[in-house]
Amino acid sequence: MRVLSWVYLAAAYAFVFLPVVVLVAFSFQDGRLPVPPFQGVTLDWYAAVLGDRDLVAALVNSAMVATVSSLVALVLGFLAAHALARVRLPGTMLLRGMLIAPMTVSYLIIALGLLALFNQMGVRLSLWTAGIGHVVINLPLCFAISYAAMGDHQKSAERAARDLGAPEWKVLFLVSAPMLAAPLAAAFFLSVTFSWDEFIIAFLLTRFDVTLPVEIWSMLKSGLSPATNAVGSLVFLVSVTLVVVLEIFVFRRVK
Amino acid sequence: MTAGVSIAKVTQRYGTALALDGVSLDIAAGEFVVLLGPSGCGKTTLLNIIGGFAEPSEGRVLIGGRDMTGVAPKNRPTTTVFQDYALFPHMTLAENVAFGLRMRGIGRMAREAKANDMLALVGLGGRGAFRPHELSGGQRQRVALARALAVEPDVLLLDEPLGALDLKLRRAMQDELKDIQRRVGTTFVHVTHDQEEAMAIADRIVVMNGGRIEDEGPPQQVYLRPRTLFSAAFMGEINRIPVKDGVSRLGVLGVPDGCLCIRPEAISERGSLRLGPCRVEETTFFGTYLRARVSPVRAPDLRLVVHLPQRSAPEVGTVLDLGAETHVVLEA
């Protein structure tokens, strides 16, 4: 039975990670196609990818969109959570529900809605519009994480700060936010990873400057190549790094 | 540095519930006042109104002669020590204590010096670099006290500050609190439901019940000459004997009509108000005294609690001739 459970564990991990392993392995393929047989190891494709100006530009765009949209989502989500955790109004439940609701709407619907809205308003598509889309999907996440982290302990510390003469913005900046440093960082990094590999919204809401997933998609249109595997591996590497950073600096400290 | 507080006909309603019912109270500058009462009596509501955390439905509060209506907590000459300490966990002790000074725009050097002085005052000198989670409950409460006193408030409000501490530590902190209050001279308004704590620290005890002030005065007066039955019972155990038309169930005692109240420790064989022979039903040793339950021979179904000297050891069934040394008669 012990052996069986180990086999099961191995099978489960293989199921999850085999595609990634294959993707990464064939990014080193010394040949024209990322398919078996494996013809030897080369870093040529990585050189080609990093030498491709469009790809590198897309990479920088993605990093910018992810960082800025996550920061905006975090600030808005935190402020909303702070307000709703304090004030008991008849509409609190409804407000809270409406803030979390976008989580249940598919990205495609959100993207289409924003696209129609931007067309109506005459807003030209750009990285900014994609960034706004990412704020829409990440705000509920940031709100939910911040809201869950707020407790009585924090409420009384804020009360003490006010009692000692702190104006409201200093209460937020010097007491509320620092006390929630770990969950806020978690919300931020999760938002960054979601924005980093989000495709549909970025595809529909960008025009000339695009993010990395959109660029990869346009590469795929011209057929399979180990170069796409190399880009995919780089994207994966960034996501993994973020998760590891999160694990080490945030979640471990919370425990 | 210190100011008096004047509470004028303060009423507080929550919906239809009346938390405070026309409370008036004058507190002198530098006085140590304890608001005492069971939970739900309005004592914490009154403290919140003095601190500005709640606005009264009616009436007003003056601090140092200034009307505090509409003044936010941060602009009041008051600070509060909370029961749950409410320290800032992400700051060092020195930063915690200096927080109020920082909010008042005092320079780093000056506020660090002041924070160290305040920590020394509460017996935590040299621990400025520690963080709250490294301290015990009693030490955290000292930091909270230092933090509240650092801004030199006119009035310090203490909301059951010792409630979370164990009994021994609580008694030790009481002495210290009293000592610190004498040194800084600030007006202290302290809320508690522990009557022993109240007697240990207060210049004046204000007994509250049902949103009203039942009784007030120095500890000795409130304990020995309470104004109401509630106050008498809340301050400690008491024997009640109803008297009507000059006659009680123990016969004619020569006291006015009402409810004759006698503390257990006031009853002895020498007491001048004679209660007559009483049979010992049960005794328990409490260290400083022997607690006995007795029933008067003249009214066998009446039970009296008597504190006898610790060395006395009357057998159950012994008949003692008892009398009360002090007593009060209150309206029933």
Image (spheres, coloured by chain):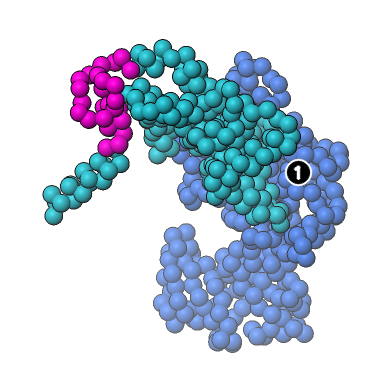
Residue A91 seen = yes
Front-lying residue, B68 or B123: B68
Residue B81, picture quadrant: top right
Tell me the residue at 50%/81% (across/down).
Answer: B279
Q: Position of residue A153 (x, y in %)?
A: 56, 44
* Relative side of A150 to A196, left or right: right
Tell me the residue at 54%/46% (across/down).
Answer: A106
Q: Position of residue A148 (x, y in %)?
A: 53, 46
The residue that mark 1 highlights is B52
Q: Position of residue A235 (x, y in %)?
A: 40, 27
Identify the hue of chain B.
blue
Front-lying residue, B88 or A121: A121
Tell me the crowding category of disc 1: few under 14, some 14 to 19, or many 20 or more residues within 10 angstroms, Cα based: many
Q: Main secondary structure of the magenta part?
A: loop
Q: Amino acid at mark 1?
A: Gly
Chain letter for mark 1, please. B
Identify the hue of chain A.
cyan
Task: Locate the C terminus of chain B by quadrant.
Answer: bottom right
Image height of B301 relative to A61, above or below: below
Residue B283 lies within the magenta run = no
Image height of B188 relative to A25, above or below: below
Residue range (magenta): A18-45
* Relative side of B308 to A76, left or right: left
